[in-house]
Image (spheres, grey):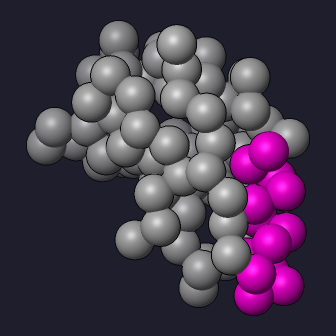
Amino acid sequence: MPEVSYFYGIAIYMYMSEHNPPHFHVKYQDYEAIITIDGGVVTGSLPRRALNLVYEWLDLHKNELMENWKRMENKEAIVKIDPLK
C-alpha cells in the first residue's frame, strides 16, 4: 500500500492498479473511505472531524494528487505529499 501522506492519525493511500475516476483511500482508526480527487465524493465513512481534515488537505494538494494519479497511469512511482499542518 503506497502511503501518500499521514497526519493526525489519518493515512492517505493510492494504489497502482486503480480505476477511474481519480481517487485516494483514507484510513482512520476503524474507518475507511474512498474520496474522489475532483469532486470529493466519499464512498465509505469517516467521522466528521477526520473528513473535514481530509477535505482541507485535499483542497491544498489537489494538483499533487492528480500528478500522482498520472504517474500511476504511466506505471511510475508516486511521490509523498506533505501532511496537513
The answer to whether residue 38 shows anywhere in this view is no
Say which quarter of the image contains residue 46.
top left
Magenta stretch, residue numbers: 64-76
At x 34% / y 34%, what residue is drawn?
10
The answer to whether residue 12 shows anywhere in this view is yes
- Residue 82 lies, in percent from the top left, at 61, 33
Say which quarter of the image contains residue 17.
bottom right
At x 74% / y 48%, what residue is drawn?
65
- Residue 11 lies, in percent from the top left, at 37, 43
Q: Looking at the figure, which quarter contains the N terminus?
A: bottom left
Answer with left or right where residue 16 lies relative to residue 42: right
At x 35% / y 15%, what residue is drawn?
48
Q: Is the magenta stretch mostly helix, strand or loop?
A: helix
- Which one is in front, 48 or 50? 50
Q: Check residue 34 for magenta coloring.
A: no
- Residue 5 lies, in percent from the top left, at 50, 43
Say which quarter of the image contains residue 73.
bottom right
